[in-house]
Image (cartoon, rainbow, N blue to C red):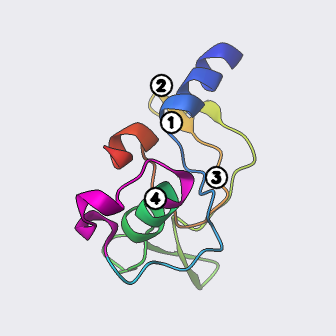
Amino acid sequence: MNEVLQYLNNMITTVNPGFNVCIPERHPCQKGSNELSDDQWNYIDLINKLQRHTRCSPAYCFRVKNEQQYCRFNYLKENTFVRDDGHSQPELVTKKNDPFINLHSKLQLQG
């Protein structure tokens, strides 16, 4: 299971290496070909502009617990693990350092 989790961590992620970096004003996909690079900053701009949950609504993510409203995506995880989803199916819960990051593939996002 550890090998499977390590493999999955390399393929998909919910870790944001630029968690404290500002969201870029200019959309990263509007860069000209002479501005493109595959470096870490390009990836961070893409994550912060495209892969962060930014709009909450009662129909989508707001939940109420103990009379307190909260966003169901606002949680952090220290490690990746697999758990039973309650329907006898495995559910992958990925390591997460940003409470609003979406699950994504770095390779696909930069592609």
Image quadrant where one finds the C terminus: top left
- In three-dimensional space, the C-alpha distance between marks 1 and 3, rounded to whole angstroms, equals 18 Å
In the rendered image, the quadrant that contains the N terminus is top right
Numbered disc 3: secondary structure: loop
Mark 4 and mark 1: Cα distance apart in space: 35 Å
Amino acid identity at mark 1? Asp
Q: Which residues are magenta?
A: 27-41
Label 2: element kind? loop
**Quadrant of residue 79 in the image?**
top right
| Residue 96 badge | 3
For the point 40% across and 38% down, which residue is it?
107
Find out whether the residues at labels 1 and 3 contact each other: C-beta distance under 8 Å.
no
Give the residue type that dot 2 points to. Ser
Amino acid type at mark 4: Asn
Q: Is residue 34 depicted above or below 107 in this figure?
A: below
36 magenta-colored: yes
In the image: residue 5, left or right of residue 87:
right
